[in-house]
Image (cartoon, rainbow, N blue to C red):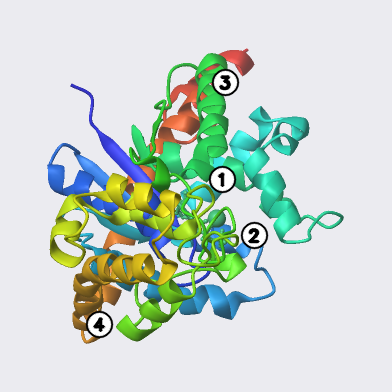
Amino acid sequence: MAEKIILTGDRPTGKLHVGHYAGSLKRRVELQNSGEYDKIYIMIADAQALTDNADNPAKVRDNIMEVALDYLSVGIDPAKSNIFIQSYVTELTELTFYYQNLVTVSRLQRNPTVKAEIQMRNFEASIPVGFFNYPISQAADITAFRATTVPVGEDQMPMLEQTKEIVHKFNFVYGDTLVDPQILLPENKACLRLPGTDGKAKMSKSLGNCIYLSESEAEVKKKVMSMFTDPDHIRIEDPGKLEGNTVFTYLDAFCTDGHFAEYLPEYANLDELKAHYMRGGLGDVKVKKFLNHVMQEELAPIRARRAEYESRIDDVYEILREGTKKAQAAAAETLAEVKHAMKIDYFETPEFLAEQRAKYAK
Ligand code: ATP
Ligand code: MG
């Protein structure tokens, strides 16, 4: 049977937050521990981060270790998953260069996620070419490792579509070479795109509306207690709305019936809590206090593991170095196959010379 391979990653533009956790990290750890995958590659996408942070290399450098620590603290196990740094796998840049020829400018312009990101960064008139191109470099990342499965949040859907198009085009033009990957979205709808604490559609480092995985208990509590809810729910007896109510979205994402039994036994489950809120008579503070318990329970073991790895920075550095070496070797194999398919393997096989000899023989 064909190998099952995972590729996924994050940009080192800040510490990782509970949006990453809900959308991708938690799933990665489950998949890792399922034992169903032959190889798992987890990429710290520093080269991609530089596409919109070219003038801030210190930020990218500073966050390499933060992201690595976040990975290890959520339970990514370096014995099972290969953590690596993108910029060191130079084969990815070379693949990107060739894939660029298979994509049109107008196709890139249609990418809805990139469109939204351009707007968010006020790039309209001055989009860096590298940033505009990053969906192509993501196709290189995914295909270099022959990934069959890409577990990510919903915002990555257009990137996967772009990758699949490149795979199909490449295989059509040059012969079957690249593996067609599948996106794996979170099963829980609330996790597809976790909103920010301010109620904005997406929790994102760039928007400053995050709860970070490494934050202290007190910081998390403060953020939960000041989270966006229903602005029309002023008095406790008022009926409340669930739609756009961030506190309830987080409960959808994180809470279980077990949490009710432990912290709020007057309700059997989230449906009962929601019904009371909509009826009126349930205050935001009570719901937020419950959410705080849920979040603290999820984050406490992550925090503890982080503290342990922070005291072993040399080991984490070695994990990154080893992982990067392995990733480089895997990507080099794919690049060799790609170049062979594209007929640019002049020095790798004797065929080129044989062809030339035949052509010029008198
Ligand atoms: P930046 O603002 O620098 O783009 P980001 O917060 O969007 O940072 P990324 O590194 O771009 O984070 O995203 C990494 C992964 O986390 C992707 O798989 C993405 O789908 C997922 N992800 C990021 N934010 C969320 C969110 N709010 N909800 C669900 N998944 C998310
Ligand atoms: Mg992003």
Q: Which mark is residue 169?
A: 3
If you read the primary sequence from the N terminus, does the residue marked by circle 3 or circle 4 appear first? 3
Q: Which mark is residue 137?
A: 1
Disc 2 residue type?
Thr
Residue indicated by mark 4: 314
Q: Can residue 232 be seen here?
A: yes
- What residue lies at 49% left-to-right and 61% top-to-bottom? 11
If you read the primary sequence from the N terminus, does the residue marked by circle 3 or circle 1 appear first? 1
Look at the image and tell me in which quarter the N terminus lies: top left
Disc 1 residue type?
Ser
The quadrant holding residue 277 is bottom left
Q: Which mark is residue 51?
A: 2
- Residue 225 higher or lower than 136, as above or below: below
Secondary structure of the residue carrying numbered label 1? helix
If you read the primary sequence from the N terminus, does the residue marked by circle 3 or circle 2 appear first? 2
Judge left or right: residue 269 versus residue 105: left
Q: Which mark lies nearer to you, 3 or 2?
A: 2
User: Who is closer to the viewer here, 349 or 125?
Assistant: 125
Q: Percent from the top left, x then y, of residue 24? A: 36, 50
Secondary structure of the residue carrying numbered label 2? loop
Q: Percent from the top left, x then y, of residue 15? A: 44, 72
Judge left or right: residue 254 versus residue 304: right
